[in-house]
Image: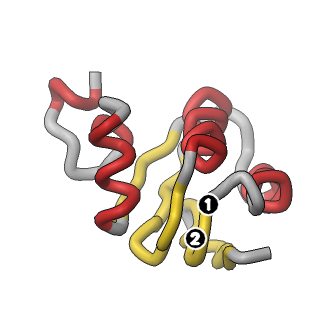
């Protein structure tokens, strides 16, 4: 396991990697700390690597309960921007969030 999940009052902070190698364990940890229909805030400022598996986890959480990324590393920001998912971030403009 190359990630750490720190529970927070409204969500969690993830550090390390969000890759295919971590996806199964990370998915179980995230689902254990979220409730369907209740929005979750994620701090991804300490995520070093993210690939499509990590991105799929974010989209799963978005569909399940709603996600707001309150902080993200340059790596995460780059992937979200590349995939036109800037709307998941807390500093998204209204147009990006739509």
Label 2 SS: strand
Q: Position of residue 50 (x, y in %)?
A: 53, 57
Report whether 85 appears left or right of 4: left
Tag 1 residue: 18
Q: Position of residue 75 (x, y in %)?
A: 36, 62
Report whether 4 appears left or right of 48: right
Q: Quadrant of the C terminus?
A: top left
Circle 1 residues within 10 Å: few <14, some 14–19, many ≥20: many
Q: Position of residue 49 (x, y in %)?
A: 51, 65
In the displayed structure, would residue 65 be above or below residue 8?
A: above
Tag 2 residue: 14
Q: Are marks 2 and 1 in contact (CB under 8 Å)?
A: yes
Kindly identify the residue that appears in the image at 58 percent across and 70 percent down. 14
Q: Quadrant of the N terminus?
A: bottom right
Q: Is residue 11 visible?
A: yes
Q: Quadrant of residue 73?
A: bottom left
């Amino acid at each position: 396991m190359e990630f750490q999940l720190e529970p927070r009052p409204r969500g969690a902070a993830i550090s390390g990697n969000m890759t295919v190698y971590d996806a199964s364990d990370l998915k179980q940890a995230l689902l254990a700390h979220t409730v369907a229909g209740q929005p979750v805030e994620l701090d991804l400022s300490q995520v070093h690597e993210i690939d499509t598996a990590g991105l799929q986890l974010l989209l799963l959480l978005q569909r399940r309960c709603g996600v707001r990324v309150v902080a993200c590393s340059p790596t995460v920001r780059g992937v979200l921007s590349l995939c036109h998912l800037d709307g998941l971030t807390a500093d998204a403009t209204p147009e990006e969030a739509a």
